[in-house]
Amino acid sequence: EIELYWPVGDQSFIPEIESSGRLLISNASDRAVNGNAAVVYGRQLGDLIFRAKLQGTFERADFEFIEADGRNFSVRGTRNLAFSSPDARFISSEFRQIRSNSYSLATDFDFRDRYLGAFHIRREGSSLFGARARWQTYYRASAAYRISHEPWWVIPGVDEFKLRAAYGTAGSRPNFFARFQNAASGQNFGNTGLEPEFARELEYGLDMVLLKRFALDLTYAKSTIEDQILFVPLPGSYV
């Protein structure tokens, strides 16, 4: 909390000019809490190794800001904003609450140390989006084949030769103000039905180890984004 006071007649604010009185009070509070819980399971069935992780997370963030500024006091020695001039009295406040929850399941398997795979699915909800689009589902699947671990592999000097591929989806969060129209500054048109950006990515790759000392990784990736979140300025007539 901040409180600044210049009594009537004070010259510390501007030495050449006597103050008509000013009181500035500002208070800000920023709190955040987050946590997660997870359960991990693993099992081996012959040549197959299977692992799974079930996880839940939550995030809570609260921000409060209040500021009051009064000038031109009619009564000397008072710190009551009611005695400041109505034309020189300003009060502003801001309250933000963000709530997010997510649940995910990640699995992967390894068969004979040469056939690899993984699958991840996540259900996520956030108050930053519109009421009808707060919950979304994302996923990712990947597979790899370590050809060099096959018994018939006979290429000398190539110690590791792995092919891999993956496909997945993801979303991104906007800032708190994206859903609200700001007519005062003209910065944003706002969208009360805001949906998350939706990204899809396809990836192919090759990993090699040569002569037990040189590594080569080649990757090709293609990503597309739908419903990209952009700030739209208000029309000039609203500014």
Image: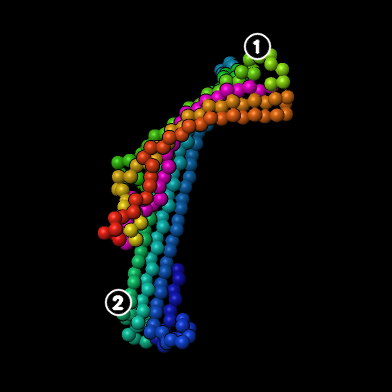
Residue at left offset 36%, top offset 40%: 227
Amino acid at the residue labelled 2: Asp
**Coordinates of residue 172 in the picture (x, y in percent):** 43, 42
Q: Is residue 161 visible?
A: yes
**Coordinates of residue 75 in the picture (x, y in percent):** 34, 86
**Coordinates of residue 219 in the picture (x, y in percent):** 56, 30
Residue 8 in the magenta stretch? The answer is no
**Between 80 and 39, the one nearer to me in the picture:** 80
Describe the element under mark 1 as helix, strand or loop.
loop
Residue at left offset 44%, top offset 76%: 4
Give the residues in magenta: 159-184
Asked if residue 189 is positioned above or below residue 219 in the image, the reply reads below
User: Which disc is residue 127 wearing?
Assistant: none
User: To which residue does mark 1 refer?
Assistant: 152
Asked if residue 158 is positioned above or below residue 193 in the image, the reply reads above
Question: Residue most toward the top?
Answer: 152
